[in-house]
Amino acid sequence: MTSLESATVPVKVKRATRSSWAGLAVITPVLILLAMGPYILGRGLQQNLVILFSLIVLGTMWNLLAGYGGMVSIGQQAYIGIGAYGLVYIADTIGIDPFLAVPFAVVIAGVLSFPISFLAFRLSGGYFAIGTWVIAEVVKLVVEQMDVLGAGSGVSLMSITDLSPGRRIAYVYWLSLIAVVVAVAVTYLLMRSRLGLGFTAIRDDAVAAGSLGVRVTRSKRIVYVIAGMGCALAGAMIAANTLRVQPESIFSVQYSAFMIFIVVIGGIGTIEGPIVGAVVFFALQQWLSDFGVWYLVILGLLAIIITLLLPRGIWGLISGNGRIRLFPVGYRLVNPLEKYALIKPKDSVATNAADKEAGAHD
């Protein structure tokens, strides 16, 4: 006597979940509504949303670097500055349209991040984190010695001022919204790929991943370069929004602190986490802006509390510790028989045992 459970049943592999389809149904109209922002929002609110969009990009890139790649960096402000100064130089000195200059600034950051990675990867752990900060300070010192970039006093983005204020703010807003979509989409597609699976393995145990054939250094370098380019994109957004770049502000280590805060409170190692964390951080920043330096103390205390009480972050709480995934990057094995309630997983062992017993009596 053969049970239905003992038959060979093809198992389907799925990635999409009901929550991801529901999320797509919500995200699509939200993006359409955001795209209409310049037509329905005031200029001040548009500029504030550009700040929020830049925070989402920065948080997503730091999460890719640390949450998926396992590399904790406190020097990503180097690439923020490269993106900002690259935009100003290409637009004002070379004469390329400011919005067309953004991709060139991002590419410059990617080209520079490649040789820099050889220096950074000579270190590991805490030494890597400190090393990235030192690299950022060196980049800042180099920029301060370049008269063409305004030296230590900074430089203004003049070419974009040819546009009317309303049109300029609208174009920067749309550019920033596109940047968010690109950053999230690249992270999502990357983590769904074979390379993304290697990133996760390296984060958990680099030695074990290497023994299984994962090219550890190559994979880490790819993540580092992509994260650098993403931060440069955010830097270009910041420069286009503020119209002025200064070394002390654009290379500030506060950007790294903000990125870490966003990812930690949102949920490290998830695509949704940095988005949630950026929204929460932006709201707190606006609410606590009148508290002066005390708002940094409050943010620090909040980060400690969330880390202790919600180790998976706010998104971990919302998603039920991973049961809800708007951007699923893993695999799910689905038994077709379970779909039609022909068998129950919890009863399968007992059923097989009963069948064996019946066969023995026969």
Image (cartoon, rainbow, N blue to C red):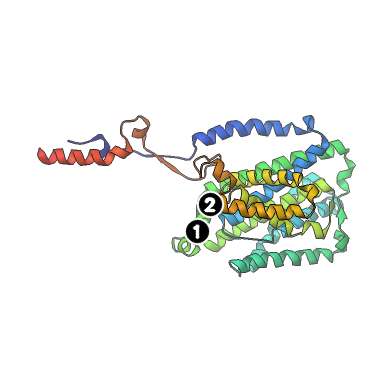
Regarding residue 137, the answer to whether it shows in the image is yes
Q: CA distance from mark 2 to mark 1?
A: 13 Å
Q: What residue lies at 61% left-to-right and 56% top-to-bottom?
A: 65
For label 2, the SS is: helix
Left or right side of 325 for 239: right
Characterize the local packing of mark 1: few (<14), some (14-19) or many (20 or more) Cα atoms within 10 angstroms: some
State the residue lying farthest toward the left: 362
Between 160 and 141, the one lying in front of the other is 141
- For residue 204, the mark is 1
Q: What residue lies at 44% left-to-right and 64% top-to-bottom?
A: 211
- For residue 259, the mark is none
User: Residue 60 in the image: x percent, y percent?
Assistant: 64, 49
Q: What residue lies at 32% left-to-right and 35% top-to-bottom?
A: 344
* Residue hosting label 2: 196
The vertical placement of 344 against 128, above or below, is: above
Quadrant (top left, top right, bottom left, bottom right) of the N terminus: top left
The vertical placement of 36 against 225, above or below, is: above
Tell us which disc is closer to us: 2 or 1: 1
- Whether the residues at callouts 2 and 1 have beta carbons within 8 Å, the answer is no
Q: Amino acid at mark 1?
A: Asp
Q: Amino acid at mark 2?
A: Gly
